[in-house]
Image: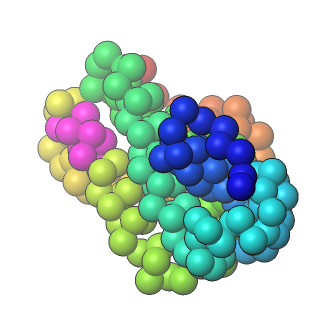
Amino acid sequence: MPRIEAPTVAEHHARRRRALLDAARELLAETEAKPAMGAVGRRAGLARSSVYQYFASADELLAALVAEIFPDWAQRVLAHVDTAHTPGERVWAYVEANLDLFAGSERAVARALTRVVDPDVLQGPMEAFHRRLQIPLRQALQDFGEPEPEAMAEHIDALILTASRDLAAGTAQDVVQARLRRLLGAYLEL
């Protein structure tokens, strides 16, 4: 009988599931490839057979990871936006938070997910992620007095996408951020 390492069996299972998801995320960031169930188990400190008690396949594990990654990323961006005071600062906080995501290990996770997860599994969470982020961006632009907040939000996202490519090519985050600040700083009255 396995040893229960939590006050309740339910909490024990929740901790183990969490450890497996964290292990899969770490492996994706490191290898940018679909993690093998055995490797996930080893990273989480569990036998390969134990992994299958929580996830029937690597695809099921990745689908569970996708279901939590996009809301997690959105929460990081939104929390940063919430710290800003003026509408212009909120827009800039949105830019900064997105650059932070693209500059960190999550960039590798995102790249890996687009390669190893069925596009049908990714599509819904990605669309929900982008919709969720657009709300505070467009609201900040509207509060700023931008007459076309939807169009300007699309342009800002295009700038962030271009900046993410620069980051992926090895340009330092502070250089990329300085470029965007030169482009947007005067407009946003920063």
Q: What percent of the width, then of the height, locates residue 64? A: 51, 64
Position of 94 with respect to 106 (left or right) is left
**Relative horizontal placement of residue 86, taking residue 23 as reference (left or right):** left
Residue nearest the viewer, comparing 90 with 186:
90
Q: What is the residue that sits farthest to the top in this orientation?
A: 85
Residue at left offset 58%, top offset 44%: 12
- Residue 131 image offset from top left, x and y in percent: 29, 57
Q: Position of residue 72 (x, y in %)?
A: 47, 46
Q: Is residue 78 visible?
A: yes
Which residue appears farthest toward the front when viewing the image? 1
In this rendering, the answer to whether 24 lies above or below 139 is: below
Residue drawn where x is 80% and y is 63% of the image: 47
> For residue 143, which quarter of the picture?
top left
> Toward the viewer: 121 or 139?
121
What range is drawn magenta here?
Answer: 134-142
User: What kind of colouring is applied to the model shown?
Assistant: rainbow
